[in-house]
Amino acid sequence: MFTINPFSVLAETVPSILIQGFVVLMVLLIITGTLLDIIHKKNVKYFFENAKKAKKNATKELSTGERIAVVSKTIAYDIGTTSELGAGKRRVAHVLGMYGTILFWVGSVVMIFGYSSANAETPTIWPMIWHIGALMTILGGSWFWFFLRVDVYSEAQPWYRIIKADLFVLALIATSLTGFIWSYLQSLNLEGRWDANLFLVLFIVSNLVLFGGVYWSKFAHMFYKPGAAIQKNLAEADGSRDNLPPPADAPEQFGLGIKREKPKHY
Ligand code: HEM
């Protein structure tokens, strides 16, 4: 199963152009959802106005080399390891889900556009990347959703309480889980048995929910967060500090209260 390209098996019954058309539709849904979100929240407009205002407070003009160094460090460390989430389970779960999703999506695109015709020979590395990516996303996403999400972890809500904010993480887990089960059932050569078809339908529906729900879900944070991290680090390097005052020149004394409990209230 881990070495079989599920899309080339599918292409024996469904024209590969249709499968490829579905991926193109998903990309169009991401673009439309994100643009609508940007228009509705006006967050990008605020972001650029704030950056322009902050530039006036810069104490240092950064050279191109310095800017490249700041951006590269931000990509490799802040974005690549989700440093914003600090040390601990939250960050490990996120990194697992994030890289799992990237592997799953890259594997999907390569196998669908490169090797989905019925007689194509898929190098085994691609189905392996796809299946491992699915497992990592299921693991990271479920760990986050069952144990770490704020309303369960900090607000003592029961794990089965579902709200609109869960749309993204649940749809993400659903795409990987239904895709993985569909691939498994298909690898058993069940001759189009109902359960293999059912999981194919569930895989399609969960993709439509994930990509069609961009406007309502947290999907677009994967574009906003990197932009904000780069801006924050550039603002630190050029001394503008996002229009914030400099740190106080005094020892950090918060009293003993702060040591009483680990911070977990957001
Ligand atoms: C393929 C890319 C990514 C995927 C699949 C992904 C996935 C997720 C998921 C499933 C959640 C939980 C959402 C929820 O609150 O229900 C989340 C939250 C979060 N993500 Fe991402 N993410 C991606 C990229 C990024 C990047 C690039 C950053 C930062 C640079 C980032 C920072 C965060 C933060 C700060 C949270 C909030 C976590 C919390 O509430 O504890 N994510 N992400």
Image: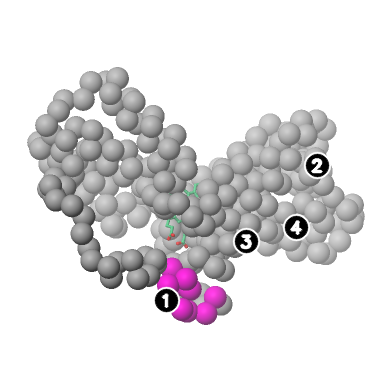
Split into 4 quadrants, where in the image is the C terminus? bottom left
The answer to the question of whether label 3 and label 1 lie on touching residues, with beta carbons closer than 8 A, is no
Secondary structure under the numbered disc 2 in the rendered image: loop
Marks 4 and 2 sit apart, C-alpha to C-alpha, by 13 Å
The answer to the question of whether label 4 and label 2 lie on touching residues, with beta carbons closer than 8 A, is no
Mark 3 residue type: Ala
The answer to the question of whether label 2 and label 3 lie on touching residues, with beta carbons closer than 8 A, is no
Instruction: Give above or below for 90 relative to 63.
Output: below
Identify residue for label 3: 174
Instruction: Give above or below for 184 relative to 81.
Output: below
Q: Is residue 56 left or right of residue 3?
A: left
State the image coordinates of residue 131 (x, y, percent, origin top left): 71, 46
Marks 3 and 1 sit apart, C-alpha to C-alpha, by 25 Å
Who comes first in sequence, dot 3 or dot 4? 3
Who comes first in sequence, dot 4 or dot 2? 2
Identify residue for label 4: 181
Could one spot residue 131 in this view of the protein? yes
The disc label shown at residue 4, or none: 2
Could one spot residue 244 in this view of the protein? no
Mark 4 residue type: Ile
Identify residue for label 1: 155
Question: Is residue 37 covered in magenta?
Answer: no
Who comes first in sequence, dot 2 or dot 3? 2
Secondary structure under the numbered disc 4 in the rendered image: helix
Q: Label 3: few (<14), some or many (≥20) within 10 Å?
A: many
Nearer to us of marks 1 and 4 is 1
